[in-house]
Image (tube, helix red, strand yellow):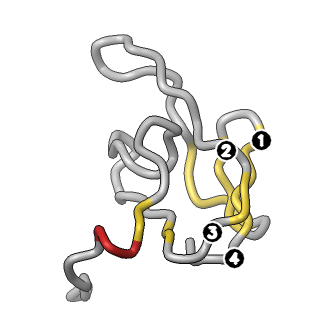
Amino acid sequence: GLPGDIITVQGRVVSINGQPVGWAKTQTYDHRPLVPIHPMVIPPDSYYVQGTSPDSFDSRYASSGLIRSAQVIGLVTPLF
């Protein structure tokens, strides 16, 4: 998600600008609770990032949250 995009959470489904992007799990493998990210507009200089695995600990969760632009150290280019 980019600055200005709108994050919403309905149940455990996380959406950006109305499009579902992932499902937030309720707990970790060792049964610690996971709280989904709070609904918001992504602020300037911040990004929503999400891994491809449903087990990724990423922006879907309030405890990890958004990434600041200063934390971005590279660009990923998928190869197919």
Q: Inspect the image, locate mark 4, and give the three-letter code of the amino acid beneath it.
A: Gly
Horizontal relation, residue 39 to residue 26: left or right:
right
Q: Amino acid at mark 1?
A: Gln
Secondary element type, mark 4: loop
Is the Cβ of the residue at disc 4 closer than 8 Å to that at disc 2?
A: no
- Asked if marks 2 and 1 touch (Cβ < 8 Å), the reply is yes
Residue lying at 74% horizontally and 34% vertically, measured from the top left:
11
Callout 3–callout 1 Cβ contact below 8 Å: no
The residue positioned 32% from the left and 73% from the top of the image is 70
* Circle on res. 43: 3
Kindly state the secondary structure of the residue where label 1 is placed.
strand
Measure the C-alpha gap from mark 3 to mark 2.
21 Å
Which element type, helix, strand or loop, lies under badge 2?
strand
Q: Earlier in the sequence, mark 4 or mark 2?
A: 4
When the figure is inspected, residue 29 is found, relative to residue 22, above or below; the finding is: above
- Asked if residue 1 is positioned above or below residue 33 in the image, the reply reads below
Q: CA distance from mark 2 to mark 1?
A: 5 Å
Label 2, on which residue? 13
Q: CA distance from mark 4 to mark 2?
A: 20 Å
Nearer-N-terminus badge (1/4): 4
Nearer to us of marks 3 and 4 is 3
Q: Quadrant of residue 75?
A: bottom left
Residue at 38 percent across and 14 percent down: it is 32
Q: How many marks?
A: 4
Q: Are marks 3 and 4 in contact (CB under 8 Å)?
A: no
- Which callout, 4 or 2, points to the residue nearer the camera? 4
Q: Can you give x and y, in whole percent of width and height, for residue 61 in the image?
A: 49, 40
Q: Which residue is mark 1?
A: 10
Crowding at dot 4, Cα within 10 Å, few <14 / some 14-19 / many 20+, comes out as some
Residue depth check, mark 3 versus mark 1: number of the one nearer the observer: 3
Q: Amino acid at mark 3?
A: Pro
Element type at marker 3? Answer: loop
